[in-house]
Amino acid sequence: MNKNRYTYIYSTILLLVLLITSSCDQDLLNVQPTDRLADNAIWQDSSLVEAFVINTYIGPRLTNKEGVESSGAGFGRTWEYALWSSLTDESIYNNDDDTWLIQRGELSPANLGIAGTIWGRSYRVIRDCNLFLDNIDDVNMSESKKQRLTAEIKFVRAYRYHDLIRNYGEVPLMGDEVYQLEDNLLAEDLYEKASISEAIDYVVSELDKAAQNLPTDHNSNWEKGRATKGAALALKSRLLLYAASPLYTDGNNDPNKWQAAADAAEEVMNMQKYSLYPDYGELFLTPYNNSEIIFERVYTFDNRHLPLEIANGPNGYGGWAGNTPLQNLVDDYEMDNGMPIDESGSGYDPQNPYEDRDPRFYETILFNGAEYRDREVETFVPGGRDSEDGQQPWNTSKTGYYLRKFINPDLPITNPWNGQSTQPWIYIRYAEVLLNYAEAQNEATGPDASVHDAVNEVRNRVGMPDLPQNLTQSEMRERIRNERRIELAFEEHRFYDVRRWEIAMDTENEPAYGMRITKNGDGSLEYERKVALDGRSFEEKHYWLPIPREEIQASDGQLEQNPGY
């Protein structure tokens, strides 16, 4: 990575901020609108224009839990303390961090917990994208560079709309309009929601336009984290998969929509650019020369993100526990022979539950007896160093498990502040595209050979056996859903998957289970399920988030709240 290049980029972003704010401080009696850039300085300097584009990827920082103080916000959210997994049946956040109210179904327009920034951040960035499009024609820059940056902006805007749609359903579309303070911001049509199908059609069209002018490859490592043709097409495949799913179609199954989603995923596959990274565990620690990553956010040397090691590490090592995996997820890892643990003949032993499981289990979850750093993890009681009997008992996992995925064992857990996390955050990777294709093609035509090939490619990467050949369409549906659960665990898919499949009334009303392990005097262990977080609750209205109350108030009540809130 070129450190000087990153220093230049972030310096120009800082200059951009200073240009904006300085115009507001010159004369308090001569107030300048804060939505305008001083003297159009940015659009007169091509370097500042490129910095402006990069800043749209980063997005505004809206809460105090978005990474360390020196970092900006994330493209989708950021490397926060609580992952989106801790709003699902994958994990709970050990010390709440505004997640428990969502787990317990207590969110409201006045309090969305950690989900409260999506609306505001998305529309702020959409306006910035529109501002760019309104000015780019006047910038002194080569036409090829203008086309590239315009395509990036269209991708960023499309991603923000995709995030709005998958969280709120029907949302207003701004088009290319740049609203000013003197405009009628209470105009009725400003708050009119587009239907889900209209919004998805718009975003898919924008992604198609972006793909035409985005590069297939980055020119160098300093461009990592910026959009490519593959990123636009892969995001399109995700959005069309959502569009075909039950929640988005009111349960009206349409094979044509599923086929469109399959075709979109296949377009990425046919690029023959991406492939599965050989090592599943190292995949998440490798931002460069990684054939699987399609779109990511990378750290910079001067601006690394929250140390995931201390945030999620076991208390016996000095960690804070963080996003602690649930037994609900652990039970869904197959045996390494490919059989679910509750299937007759699987070989599963409830008194030796961590033996012979899917290899991804060992790369994702720290459990009692797991080899980690310089010893085995000890969650048993009495006396386990990573249990409530260990040091810092307030940081003991409530579930009996700790997160291993994303964690770099070569980085320190204690006092990590000068060696903070260097992992990328992967928004889209090739395994998701393969599973998108498998799900969509199975729904469109049934479990043909191409469906088996796509799923088996993901499974074979870690040494898991092929799926059985004689599966029905419904049986394949369940296997694909479980494959997504395991392969994409903690990558912020589960929250949206259980909603679009309309199974959240089941999965999110299950108790949040953990495992209590008791060590007997003779050294033997007894395993007993326990409830790690009580009161998990999900209602029909929770399939979509409520629009924040302040947004409804700002529209003078013209913006319609989502049903049930």
Image (cartoon, rainbow, N blue to C red):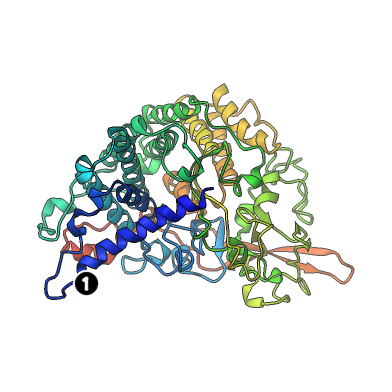
355 with respect to 57 (left or right): right
Most foreground residue, 329 or 462: 462
77 with respect to 293 (left or right): left
Residue at horizontal 38 percent and vertical 63 percent from the top = 61
- Find residue 392 and report its horizontal and vertical position in percent: 66, 77
Q: Residues within 10 Å of mark 1 (few under 14, many from 20)?
A: few
564 with respect to 78 (left or right): left
- The vertical placement of 73 against 5, above or below, is below
Disc 1 residue type? Asp
Residue, far top: 449
Res. 112 in view:
yes
Res. 172 in view:
no
- Find residue 8 and report its horizontal and vertical position in percent: 42, 54
Q: Quadrant of the C terminus?
A: bottom left
Residue at horizontal 9 percent and vertical 58 percent from the top = 184
558 with respect to 198 (left or right): left
In which quarter of the view is residue 142 placed? top left
- Find residue 301 and report its horizontal and vertical position in percent: 53, 57
Q: What is the number of callouts on the image?
A: 1
Residue at horizontal 50 percent and vertical 28 percent from the top = 269
**Residue that badge 1 annotates:** 25
Instruction: Indicate the secondary structure of the residue bearing disc 1.
Output: helix
- Find residue 397 and report its horizontal and vertical position in percent: 64, 68
Residue, far right: 522
In which quarter of the view is residue 277 placed? top right
